[in-house]
Amino acid sequence: MGITQHTSGTNNVFALVNLALLTGNVGRPNAGLNPIRGQNNVQGACDMGMLPLVYPGYQFVNDPEVKAKFERLWGVDYLSDKIGLTSPEIIRQILDGKVKGLYIMGENPAMSQANLNLVTDAFKKVEFMVVQDIFLNETAEYADVVLPACSFAEKEGTTTRGDRRIQRLRTAIPPIGESKPEWEIIKLIASKMGKGHLFHYNNTAEIFDEIGKVADQFAGISHQRIDKEGIAHAAHRTTSHENCVA
């Protein structure tokens, strides 16, 4: 994570890739580059489509077949085929008057983004801003609404490491105060917006089962399987569900 968070971040990555190529450490067993993630579930977030150009499983949003697939699964006909914005692009478009609202979950860009003066100017200008977090952090100070989320110790789910190992999270203590797991908050908001029927999940196990249906890497993996066997590995993308679980 740190290697990219510099003004020369892209060149830093190119330099490492070139070094691996020059020394013959690409394309053979026990070799290659292994980025160390900055937080415990950065990999899992990316796997689930927390990037502006992909759905879960790194399926491109501008692929008509992928778009149709997710529309069938989710029972809608209005998914966009336009690639979204990166975090810096969102900030710029707020300042340009093109982005009017923000919903920020589990992130503190008022501390972590580059050019904080630009970021805070954008937060002051945006018309409506929601922050969903476990802390009243620096970003939440600019929010119109703050939704209290749960910490890892108060919820069920999974986390995925950089080597694609999937581990279970289990509730150690009940949610504190009015806090709720993220998925429950989103489900409640969807219900208030008249879309509750599209968020029919009762628990995180059901959500993970759906992930296995839409992303080949996760087919065959479930909470029950992880509970029985321990850590599971997400597989490389393949069209065969029989071969996609390591």
Image (tube, rainbow, N blue to C red):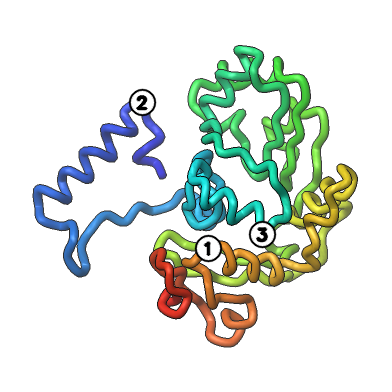
Q: Determine the secondary structure under disc 3.
A: helix
The image quadrant where one finds the N terminus is: top left
Residue identified by numbered label 2:
7
Q: What amino acid is at disc 2?
A: Thr
Q: Nearer the viewer, mark 1 or mark 3?
A: 3
Q: Is residue 160 left or right of residue 184?
A: left
Q: Position of residue 42 (x, y in %)?
A: 51, 52
Q: Horizontal and vertical percent for residue 28?
A: 17, 65
The crowding category of the residue bearing disc 3, from other C-alpha atoms within 10 Å (few below 14, some 14 to 19, many at least 20), is few
- Secondary structure state at the residue bearing disc 2: loop
Q: CA distance from mark 1 to mark 3?
A: 12 Å
Whole-angstrom CA distance, mark 2 to mark 3, is 41 Å
> Which one is nearer the viewer's eye here, 41 or 190?
190
Query: Which of labels 1 and 2 is toward the front?
Result: 1
Q: Quadrant of residue 73?
A: bottom right
Residue type (three-letter) at the residue carrying disc 3: Leu
87 versus 189 height, above or below: above
Tags 1 and 2 touching, CB below 8 Å: no
Distance from label 1 to label 2 (Cα)? 34 Å
Q: Which residue is mark 1?
A: 215
Q: Estimate the x, y position of residue 19 in percent, counting from the top left.
A: 15, 46
Label 1 Cα crowd, 10 Å radius (few <14 / some 14-19 / many 20+):
many
Q: Earlier in the sequence, mark 1 or mark 2?
A: 2
Which label was assigned to residue 73?
3
Q: Earlier in the sequence, mark 1 or mark 3?
A: 3
* Badge 2 vs badge 3, beta-carbon distance below 8 Å: no
